[in-house]
Amino acid sequence: MSVIIFECKKCGTCCRNLFDDIQGIRKGLLLTAKEVSLFPSEMISPSSAVGTEKRKKIIIYQLNVNTCPRIDNKNECLIYDKRPLMCKAFPYESGSFSTKCTVFSRRKVGQFYCDFAPSEFQIDASEKLNRYVRNRFRKYFIRGIKVWEYDLTTKNWVFKAQHNKYPYVRNAEKL
């Protein structure tokens, strides 16, 4: 079986379908603290926050519109060279491919996701985003920390979890 390196068809679907509903919470395109400056402030909302009693520190932000304001009518990104990590990684998301991408949502019979491979660039961008979130969480971690997610539909914070141990420990590594 041959592996096909993913090639973008430049259809623009990914830039015009940013919202995800995850466990009943509407989420937008994730943005690091530096990436929020790429968009108008009214299009930015927090995504995740941590604290012991209240939400004190925002871990990551999100775009609160379903269509990216930086895509033009030719499906070209106006900020391509400095686009967010989430965009650089797309359609590769934490070890799998997004079904939002038309390459994967319109599969031919007999063609499997394992036939495709992300580029090193996409894997690197995905890993950088994951490291960013883990490092921000680690920076503010204390025993009993609580995690909230911001729901774009209700415009309310939703309590997600409380952690007494740092959850991202690998290979018996300790804080």
Image: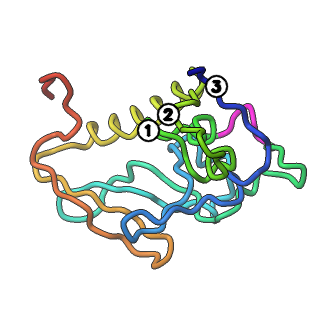
Q: How many angstroms separate mark 1 from mark 3 (CA)?
A: 19 Å
Q: At 78% across and 40% down in the image, what residue appears?
A: 9
Amino acid carrying label 1: it is Ser
Residue 4 circle label: 3
Name the residue furthest bottom: 154
Span highlighted in magenta in the image: 79-83
Residue 43 circle label: none
Quadrant placement of the C terminus: top left
Q: At 58% across and 60% down in the image, what residue appears?
A: 44
Q: Position of residue 166 (x, y in %)?
A: 17, 39
Residue 126 circle label: 2
Mark nearer the N terminus (2 vs 3): 3
Q: Decide: marks 1, 2 in contact (CB < 8 A)? A: yes
Q: Secondary structure at mark 1?
A: loop
Mark nearer the N terminus (1 vs 3): 3
- The image quadrant of residue 54 is bottom left
Q: Secondary structure at mark 2?
A: helix
Judge whether 16 appears above or below 32 on screen. below
Amino acid carrying label 2: it is Ser
Mark nearer the N terminus (1 vs 2): 1
Q: At 38% across and 56% down in the image, what residue appears?
A: 48
Report the label total: 3
Q: Secondary structure at mark 3?
A: strand
Query: For residue 37: magenta?
Result: no
